[in-house]
Image (cartoon, coloured by chain):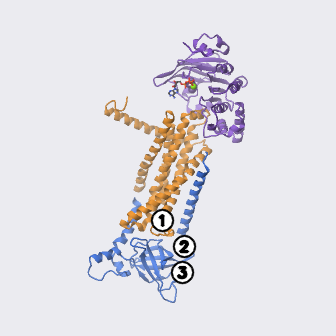
Chain colours: A purple, B orange, C blue
Amino acid sequence: MTTTAKIAWTGISKRFGAQVVLDGLDLAVAPGRSLALLGRSGQGKSVTLKLALGLMKPDAGQVLLDGVDVTRQSEAERRASFRGIGMLFQGGALFDSLPVWENVAFRLINADGVGRAEARERAVEALSLVKLAPEVADRYPSELSGGMQKRAGLARAIVGTPSLLFFDEPTTGLDPITAGAINELIRDRVTSLGCTAVSITHDMASARTIADELAMLDNGRIVWRGRADELDHADHPLVRAFVTGQSME
Amino acid sequence: MGLFSTNPVAALGRATLEGVAAIGRVGLFAARGISAALSPPWYPRQIIAQFASVGFLSLPVVGLTAWFTGAALALNIYSGGDRFNAETVLPQIVALGITRELGPVLAALMLAGRVASAMASEIGAMRATEQIDAMVTLSTDPRRYLIAPRLIAATISLPLLTLITDIIGVAGGMQVSNYLIDLSPGIYIANTMDFLTAWDVESGLIKSAVFGFIIGLMGCYHGDSAKGGARGVGRATTSAMVSAAVLILAADYLLTSVFALK
Amino acid sequence: MRASWAETIMGFAVLAFAALMLTYALGVSGLKHSSGTYEVSARFGEAGGIQPGAKITVSGVKVGSVSDVTIDPKTYLAVMHLSLSKDVKLPSDSTAKITSDGLLGGAHIALMPGGAEDDLKPGSEINNTQGAVDLFGLIGQFIRPQSGSPAASSADSAAKAPAAAASAAPKAAADLPEM
Ligand SMILES: Nc1ncnc2c1ncn2[C@@H]1O[C@H](COP(=O)(O)OP(=O)(O)OP(=O)(O)O)[C@@H](O)[C@H]1O
Ligand SMILES: [Mg+2]
């Protein structure tokens, strides 16, 4: 690797009590590339993203963001570096005390000092990108369906055009048509805006659209990594099982 | 390894260490909360929203409590105090009791039930659903956005509520004395106003500012350290309320002794 | 913040009530110096629990209140400053008597109009007074008669016998600030 990776996990280990979740994970994503992180449920994909955001501390290893170790950063430094990062949480994590538009515009209003009128405009714009109508803007998260909440969370992640995007299962719970639109949106962020993206997904069709590269997480390590077009010829049994949708023996 | 599985001395030692560690955690949490409350950036909308929910919306419950307390106090002085002619100074005793002790303490206890628990469950739920993590990724410090406004609003609202309690408590006493001993409202108030000193009221307000801080702190601390989903949030809510109430009463005794000895 | 209307209205109602009560309180405590009253004084041998603010009646109807209670340092008599309504003109030989509504009721001052031609002037003094009846002293003497005449309810005799009951009240009040 000649250029510095946009984001790199090096030798990351993470344990919860006796349960070892990550065990010397190594993974790097180059700037302007889109990576899909695959893996069976409960293998630590969400934990991997949270470690990258410094929301959890690893037991060993480093997370390098533009070459800087975020695990040793102070909280204030980390918050500053978050200005270039957008994150969609698996559960949406919308603020249920705020209407949808204020959720989407949260960073603009509270960290970037954008006026409320302008912030609202940009929030409605972002909502239209995720196929949510402007009427939704004034509703509260509890009044939205699960898929709508997910898309509102997605709008919150992309507003303000951050250069590094993390999506935890962006299309789970969406119908194929809306899912397709979301896949296009993520793809577009990477190709036309030059963002770096790391997306967790269980949906292979989605993974092929979104990602330049794929990585399979299993037993705390990356067990396979390759380009989207290499998927069908992969000889790793777990990857094959993912592609064919059959259970492994 | 449970508390009872080893010898009692070790268990006692562990419990003590755990207690000391808890005090340390609360102290650290308080210090960080205060420093966030005292330095920019502030979030005025959040602060105003907290004033509305902590202060304004507590008015009905605090007002009712004050009225009944003032009325019951007057009744008690009338029926129990006649042993030493206390009913001749009924307005004065009600005024003293309300301003110095019952007003601040009862308003604080009502808020411990209404506000500390609500704060704990709200912040606990936000923790459980990753909203606090999300806030951090949106470059916003939850300590400034969530904790500081609550601490500020609770510390300032409670003295204001206590002032209302003082007034309504006296009104309750006045109403009871009016029908009980035919003491005219005018005389009742005149007696009260002549008798009360500024310090009677001020000392109550100083106490209630401390109580307000305790309420905000316990609500936020227990909410922030809630673990384990809905059950954890439920536990946090209860601990917030109980610990706030106990600390309020302890602080009341401490502050009152300081005031009495000064 | 999505508070219901009812809660908001209740909040304002409580605020309004407190504001009303406060205005009333400030109004009452300022009444002593209002222009609708005039001040006279009266000396009593025994104040008997009369506090500033106690009501003053004529034939049971309130006509004013006690604005101040002081002690005359020479004669040791209690000096009551009475604030009376301007509408009530009283003859100069009227009598002021400390009385109470019942055995344990609120002490007040009852005025009994005399028959003189001229009225009490503002700032003048009511000369005919009857101090507080020392009920407990009376009862005590009734049970254990002592030599001499029984206590009359005149200013002189009441002044000589410090009343146990009456002195208990101010003492209780003085103790309270330490609670
Ligand atoms: N805060 C936590 N405390 C304890 N254990 C945790 C915590 N967070 C995650 N884990 C454990 O770590 C493991 C990995 O969790 P993670 O959420 O990363 O799974 P995942 O790969 O994202 O699964 P899914 O595809 O179902 O979302 C799980 O076994 C989980 O029990
Ligand atoms: Mg996950």
Quadrant location, the N terminus of chain A: top right
Mark 2 or 1: the one toward you: 1
Do marks 3 and 1 share a chain? no
Judged left or right of residue C160, residue B237 is right
For disc 3, the chain is: C
The C terminus of chain A sits in image quarter: top right
**Residue positioned 37% across, 33% down in the render:** B14
| Above or below B106: residue C31 | below
| Labelled pair 2, 1 in contact (Cβ < 8 Å) | no
**Disc 1 secondary structure class:** helix
The residue at which mark 3 appears reads as: C88
Dot 2 and dot 3 within a common chain: yes
Q: Quadrant of residue B96?
A: bottom left
Q: Position of residue C179 (x, y in %)?
A: 40, 58
- Give the amino acid at mark 1: Thr
Q: What residue would you read off at disc 1?
A: B192
User: Residue C33 bears which disc, if any?
Assistant: 2
Q: Name the residue type under label 3.
A: Val
Residue C125 in the image: x percent, y percent? 47, 82
The residues bearing labels 2 and 1 have C-alpha atoms spaced at a distance of 17 Å
Q: Nearer the viewer, mark 2 or mark 3?
A: 3
Q: Are marks 2 and 3 in contact (CB under 8 Å)?
A: no
Q: Is residue B3 above or below residue A44?
A: below
Is residue A4 something that shows in the picture?
A: no
Front residue of B113/A118: it is B113
Spatial CA span between label 3 and label 1: 27 Å
- Asked if labels 2 and 1 share a chain, the reply is no
Determine which quarter of the picture holds residue A129: top right
- Mark 1 neighbour density, 10 Å: few (under 14) some (14–19) many (20 or more): many
How many angstroms separate mark 2 from mark 3 (CA)? Answer: 17 Å
Asked if ligand 1 lies within 8 A of label 1, the reply is: no
